[in-house]
Image (spheres, grey):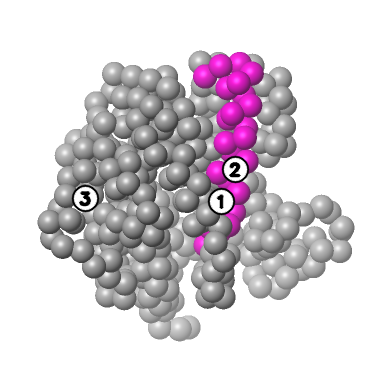
Amino acid sequence: MSADSDSGTDEVPVGARIDWSVAATVGRRIARPGPRTTGYTLNQAREELFDAARRAEAPVREVTGLADGLPVPAAEVLDRKEWISAAAQSMSSMLGGGLSDEEKPSPSITGRVSGLQAGGLLAFLSGAILGQYDPFTPDRQSGADGVLMLVTPNVIAVERAIGAVPSDFRLWVCLHEVTHRVQFSANPWLRDHMLDNVALLTTDTGESGAEALRRITESLRSGRKRESGVLGAMQLLQTPEQYEAFSRMMMLGTLLEGHADHVMDGVGPGLVPTVGRIREAFDKRRNRPQNPLQRIMRALIGMDAKLAQYIRGKAFVDEVVATVGMARFNAVWTSPETLPRPAEIDEPRLWIDRVL
């Protein structure tokens, strides 16, 4: 028996075994500093992001028809190290399977090693995240689930890189992230749906290495149609139940991101004068060539799959809204059963026929 053995860990979600305090510490230590800027410019950007997040709420609610009458919580405007701390807390909550701090296992050698690895990933992501709606972390002011986070140095870095008008770019970023806040605020069941599927994905199946190898070999021999790239690897490596949960999460993410992009196109031209230039420059930046290390990291964390989500999801929302209108489209938020299925994302008429 190794020093890392812990009786009963089979019942503990994999994510709960990661030492997230180590992840946060390591991530903060190795995170790259933000762009050089004066204190005045940094404070001005922070204040403008606070204000932009507040101003974005009303037009997003008007276009979507969601969350009307609910309170508008303030956003949290963070630096990279603050985002790492918040993200580690969120990951602990999301991947902990609902366990309280007292129920989670004591930190172990494996947990600390996993924490080191997670810290490296958080450090990498801390330089890429512009904004994020986190449905798993309580708002510090209201105590309600969910907080909108905006990462000031990254916003400044990108607006400089693409030559955007700062005030326009900051509002543009907030429109996207506020749409996510509206989605979850108006439909609280989305959070539980995500947690249920994450629990399936992170549960230790008890499958031995030999059993997993046999299952993968049989799948390869069967000739069944599989996805390509990272998605195909996930399909092979996960149990059928886990892959179904993974597919549901992918479809939900595709809907959420596509809906947010649709809303940005609907709201943006009236609020952001240079939205056309921002969209063009931002898309070029997202698709520009990366060095080999960046390409590997993008593949490992699924960033390319996420970019595909924006495109497929927006096309789905665009077509459904154009066909039936936003009010009827909003039936998609009724329950897990009304979310689009994989075949329906690329054939919106199938979703319309099934749900409407």
**Nearest the camera: 271 or 201?**
271
Taking 328 as reference, is 36 above or below it?
below
**Residue 214 in view:** yes
Q: Label 3 belongs to which residue?
A: 45
**Nearest the camera: 135 or 292?**
292
Amino acid under label 3? Ala
Amino acid under label 2? Ile
Front: mark 1 or 3: 3
Contact? badges 2 and 3 (CB < 8 Å): no
| Few, some or many residues within 10 Å of mark 2 (<14, 14–19, 20+) | some
- Whichever of callouts 2 and 3 sits on the residue coming sooner in the sequence is 3
Q: Is residue 239 left or right of residue 290?
A: right
Amino acid under label 1? Leu
At numbered mark 2, what does the secondary structure look like: helix, strand or loop? helix
Q: Label 1 belongs to which residue?
A: 307
Magenta segment, principal secondary structure?
helix
**Nearest the camera: 250 or 283?**
283
Residue bounds of the magenta highlight? 300-326
- Whichever of callouts 1 and 3 sits on the residue coming sooner in the sequence is 3
Q: Label 2 belongs to which residue?
A: 311
Measured Cα–Cα span from mark 1 to mark 3: 27 Å
Q: In this view, does 62 lie to the left or right of 71?
A: right
Q: Does the magenta stretch include residue 304?
A: yes
Point out residue 59 in the picture as x, y percentages from the top left corner: 35, 25
Task: Determine which quarter of the picture holds residue 157.
Answer: bottom left
